[in-house]
Image (cartoon, rainbow, N blue to C red):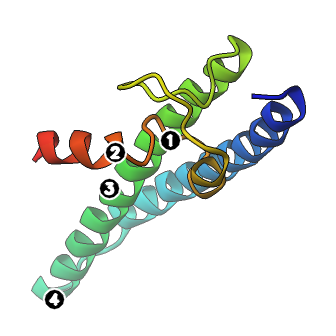
């Protein structure tokens, strides 16, 4: 991958990383507010519980994405970015534009996902 392409993806990944960190801090603040809410009845408790589960799920998903971004950024530094973890072929510019922290090429991705299920 050319240097200007690496720089392009590094900027995208850094921007997304900053946004996720902001989101996670916001989720943490909302979770704290939910814990401090006064529960008046079972309906309030159910609503707070549901909101808590949703915030936890969002936080977990964003934490996983943040970890993938950190891996992608380290690959940029080591000049191994854009190479499929499975077949070691190039991932492809268009796929990386859609998912800059992709670890697998378009051919290997369904294989990995099928094996996870």
In this view, the residue in front, 42 or 81, is 81
Residues at marks 4 and 2, CA–CA distance in whole angstroms: 42 Å
Residues at marks 2 and 3, CA–CA distance in whole angstroms: 26 Å
Q: Which mark is residue 66?
A: none
Residue under pointer 3: 56
Give whichever of discs 3 and 1 has the lower sequence position: 3
Residues at marks 1 and 4, CA–CA distance in whole angstroms: 41 Å
User: Please, what secondary structure does the residue beneath circle 4 have?
Assistant: helix
Residue placed furthest toward the top: 78
Give whichever of discs 1 and 4 has the lower sequence position: 4
In this view, the residue in front, 8 or 46, is 8
Image point (10%, 84%), residue name: 42
Residue 116 lies, with reference to residue 83, above or below; the image says below
Residue 11: % across, % down:
81, 41
Residue under pointer 1: 102
* Label pair 2/3, CB-CB below 8 angstroms: no
Q: Residues within 10 Å of mark 3 (few under 14, many from 20)?
A: some
User: Please, what secondary structure does the residue beneath circle 1 have?
Assistant: loop
Residues at marks 1 and 2, CA–CA distance in whole angstroms: 9 Å
Residue under pointer 2: 109
Residue 59: % across, % down:
41, 52
Image point (83%, 42%), residue name: 8
Give whichever of discs 2 and 3 has the lower sequence position: 3
Give whichever of discs 4 and 3 has the lower sequence position: 4
Residue under pointer 4: 43
Q: Residues within 10 Å of mark 1 (few under 14, many from 20)?
A: many
């Amino acid at each position: 991958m050319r240097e200007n392409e690496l720089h392009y993806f590094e900027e995208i990944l850094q921007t997304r990383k900053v946004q996720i960190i902001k989101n996670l801090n916001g989720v943490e603040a909302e979770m704290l507010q939910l814990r401090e809410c006064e529960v008046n009845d079972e309906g309030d408790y159910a609503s707070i519980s549901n909101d808590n589960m949703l915030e936890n799920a969002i936080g977990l998903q964003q934490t996983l994405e943040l970890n993938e971004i950190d891996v992608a950024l380290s690959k940029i530094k080591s000049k191994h970015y854009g190479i499929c973890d499975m077949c070691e072929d190039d991932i492809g510019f268009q796929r990386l534009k859609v998912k800059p922290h992709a670890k697998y090429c378009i051919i290997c991705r369904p294989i990995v996902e099928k094996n996870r299920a």
